Image: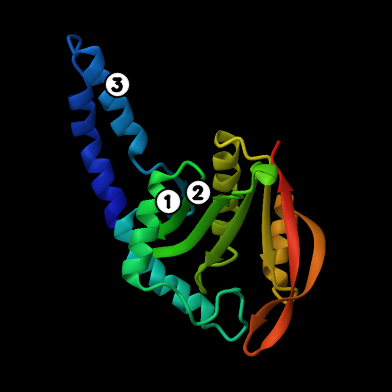
Amino acid sequence: MGLRARALAAAEPLLRRRCGGRAARRRQSRRCRRSTARRPRSRGVRGYIVRRATPADASDLVELGRAVSSEPEAWLITEGDWRNVGDERRYLRAVRRSPHAAVFVAENDAGIVGRLSLARDSHPASHHVADLGLMVAAGHRRQGIGRSMLEQAVEWARESEIEKLELHVFPHNEPAIKLYEQFGFEREGLRRDHFRRGGRLVDAVLMAYRVA
């Protein structure tokens, strides 16, 4: 369990004491329920936890994004323009205030090793669709982290009344495509010359998951 997860566990008895008491007023009870709901939710997966990201994670998330985007295989669509820590912190604050977006992280004792981003389509005609982005650090792949984070994505989608999750992936990223297909994503098409990377245009596979 990471440091932040241990701190959260240590704070839980205090939160229960604040929310307890038979003579607590109804208004105080409502405040306690809201406080509990705001805490990052977590789940375990083989020595890792998956939880909601907080602004305090900004530095670790920037480091993760830069590391994955700099891999020679070019797994990520983003290339060389990853947000700085200040921008990432502001972004995470905005996400926490929005019911239409979410960021989750996978964490172990070494720190954050995975990120899942979700954002609802803003167009009224496709408001039932959300875009998904997933990355896992090298050395932590094929350990069930990606699947666990996708399960979290589906849970968030159901709670948010999202009917469809979609993502883009490069055709050469066969490990990711295999993970998505095993989870239940389907290929919906190939977008030719859809992204510019390394000074050239590259294709992208469009995949989608129907939320039951």
Q: Helix or strand or loop: what does disc 2 sit on? A: strand
Give the quarter of the image for residue 196.
bottom right
Give the quarter of the image for residue 23.
top left
Question: Nearer the N terminus, badge 1 or badge 3?
Answer: 3
Given the image, on which type of amino acid does mark 3 rest?
Arg
Q: Which mark is residue 25?
A: none
For residue 55, above or below residue 154? below
Count how many numbered circles sit on residues in the image: 3
Q: Is residue 198 left or right of residue 96?
A: right
Given the image, on which type of amino acid does mark 1 rest?
Val
Q: Residues within 10 Å of mark 1 (few under 14, many from 20)?
A: many
Q: Which residue is mark 3?
A: 30
Comparing 148 with 208, the one in front is 208
Q: Which residue is mark 2?
A: 101
Q: Residues within 10 Å of mark 3 (few under 14, many from 20)?
A: few
Q: Which mark is residue 95?
A: 1
Q: Helix or strand or loop: what does disc 3 sit on? A: helix
Q: Is residue 126 left or right of residue 19?
A: right
